[in-house]
């Protein structure tokens, strides 16, 4: 997505008119006056903001500066830069060889092969660490990149790129957010409504749950809901991601309204599959609700969701039990017992083997430390 449309999407996700965004930019800087026409020209691409205004735009739109900077890059340049920052030099040779081998192969993996890969990654993400998933995905994405000749291949690539984005912390700047944006563009190439909604919804719940890039979380959620209004897992993720963004901003009424909508969608489309990132079973829905209630300071609702999740959470997924325990730490910290809350959350995290730690858990630990009060 180019910079102009990204600014527009982020602005509308916050409910700002062009005039309102101009006012916010004026308030944040004493260097110049910004008018509605200035915002319009930037959104249409007739004027490109320089470094000074990019910084103020990032603050006003609630995204890291690098997200706006990354939107200036062309697709190939972005992929090159992403690979350079994400892939350790020690494995670069193997990845390059894999890429050229795939391009030269006469018996390239079939679409069914990639569908099976998708199932495996969805399962493995739930139990393996981010570093291991990222290394494997780097290899497979480079191979799949040579086979994007059909809409079906674009749909698979979009879902794998979304998962790849999850191996970066949303708060580190641009990596996660830019991979989600790239995945959304790939999903659009697939012309598959379900894929287009799912990719955006998964990005929204990832960013909202992590409390990162709230403007972008809202933008992805709004896009998902605009693409297709039918109940789906993608729409469920979008609604819950938007609920978390509202909770973090202190908009309790909107957060609970969205949570009720999420429950209605879940009742229609909840998953039987218990152990896939591409599924939302009963226990996982309650993990979403547990953190939401903890952020909103509703201890009774949080405990109800935690008990419901623990009642069905597979023993093979201890990382999510750690999530629930850390939600209790957040409740303690928000109630005023910051020391006790941090100690409770830290103890839960320390009991989980380090190789099973996720970047989301680390961000949650930081939230507990800060208390994250409204």
Image (cartoon, rainbow, N blue to C red):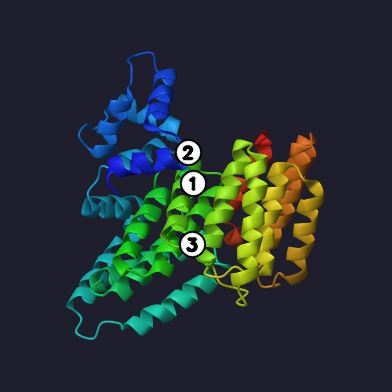
Quadrant of res 31: top left
Quadrant of res 279: bottom right
Query: In this rendering, would 185 be left or right of 363?
Result: left
Query: In this rendering, would 59 be left or right of 34?
Result: right
Q: Residue placed at 49% from the left, 58% from the top?
A: 201
Q: What label sits on residue 229 in the rendered view?
A: 3
Q: In 3D space, how far apart are the residues under numbered discs 3 and 2 (Cα atoms)?
A: 20 Å
Quarter holding the C terminus is top right
Residues at circles 2 and 1 in contact by the CB criterion of under 8 Å: yes
Whether residue 353 is visible here, answered yes or no, is no
Image position, residue 222 (x, y; %) = 46, 51
Q: Residue placed at 51% from the left, 49% from the top?
A: 207
User: Regarding mark 1 in the picture, which secondary structure is present there?
Assistant: helix
User: Regarding mark 2 in the picture, which secondary structure is present there?
Assistant: loop
Give the residue furthest to the right.
Answer: 300
Image position, residue 330 (x, y; %) = 72, 44
Q: What label sits on residue 14 in the rendered view?
A: 2
Which dot, 3 or 1, sits closer to the camera? 3
315 to 12, vertically: above or below? below
Q: In 3D space, how far apart are the residues under numbered discs 2 and 1 (Cα atoms)?
A: 7 Å
Q: In 3D space, how far apart are the residues under numbered discs 3 and 1 (Cα atoms)?
A: 16 Å
Q: Residue placed at 28% from the left, 50% from the top?
A: 81
User: In front: 36, or 69?
Assistant: 36
300 to 44, vertically: above or below? below
Quadrant of res 155: bottom left
Image position, residue 80 (x, y; %) = 25, 53
Q: What label sits on residue 218 in the rendered view?
A: 1
Q: Earlier in the sequence, mark 2 or mark 1?
A: 2
Residues at circles 3 and 2 in contact by the CB criterion of under 8 Å: no
Query: In this rendering, would 189 be left or right of 323?
Result: left
């Amino acid at each position: 997505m180019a910079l102009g449309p990204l600014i527009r999407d982020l602005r509308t996700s916050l409910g700002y008119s062009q005039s309102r965004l101009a006012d916010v930019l004026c308030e944040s800087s004493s260097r110049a006056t910004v008018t509605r026409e200035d915002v319009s020209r930037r959104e249409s691409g007739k004027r490109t903001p320089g470094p000074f205004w990019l910084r103020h735009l990032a603050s006003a739109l609630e995204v890291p500066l690098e997200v706006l900077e990354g939107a200036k890059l062309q697709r190939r340049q972005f992929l090159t830069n992403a690979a350079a920052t994400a892939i350790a030099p020690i494995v670069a040779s193997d990845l390059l060889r894999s890429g050229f081998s795939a391009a030269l192969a006469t018996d390239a993996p079939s679409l069914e092969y990639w569908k099976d890969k998708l199932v495996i990654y969805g399962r493995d993400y739930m139990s393996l660490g981010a570093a291991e998933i990222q290394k494997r995905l780097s290899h497979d994405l480079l191979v799949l990149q040579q086979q994007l000749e059909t809409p079906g291949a674009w749909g698979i690539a979009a879902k794998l790129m979304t998962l790849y984005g999850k191996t970066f912390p949303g708060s580190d700047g641009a990596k996660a957010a830019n991979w989600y944006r790239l995945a959304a563009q790939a999903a659009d190439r697939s012309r598959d409504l379900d894929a287009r909604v799912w990719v955006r919804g998964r990005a929204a719940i990832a960013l909202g749950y992590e409390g990162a890039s709230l403007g972008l979380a809202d933008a992805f959620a709004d896009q998902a809901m605009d693409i297709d209004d039918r109940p789906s897992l993608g729409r469920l993720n979008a609604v819950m991601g938007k609920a978390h963004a509202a909770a973090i901003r202190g908009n309790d009424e909107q957060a609970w309204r969205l949570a009720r909508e999420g429950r209605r969608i879940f009742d229609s489309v909840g998953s039987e599959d218990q152990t896939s990132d591409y599924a939302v079973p009963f226990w996982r829905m309650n993990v979403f609700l547990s953190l939401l209630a903890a952020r909103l300071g509703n201890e009774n609702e949080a405990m109800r969701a935690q008990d419901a999740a623990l009642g069905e959470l597979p023993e093979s997924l201890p990382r999510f039990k750690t999530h629930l325990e850390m939600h209790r730490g957040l409740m303690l910290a928000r109630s005023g017992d910051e020391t006790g809350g941090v100690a409770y959350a830290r103890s839960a995290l320390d009991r989980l083997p380090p190789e099973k730690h996720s970047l989301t858990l680390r961000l949650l630990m930081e939230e507990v430390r800060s208390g994250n009060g409204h």
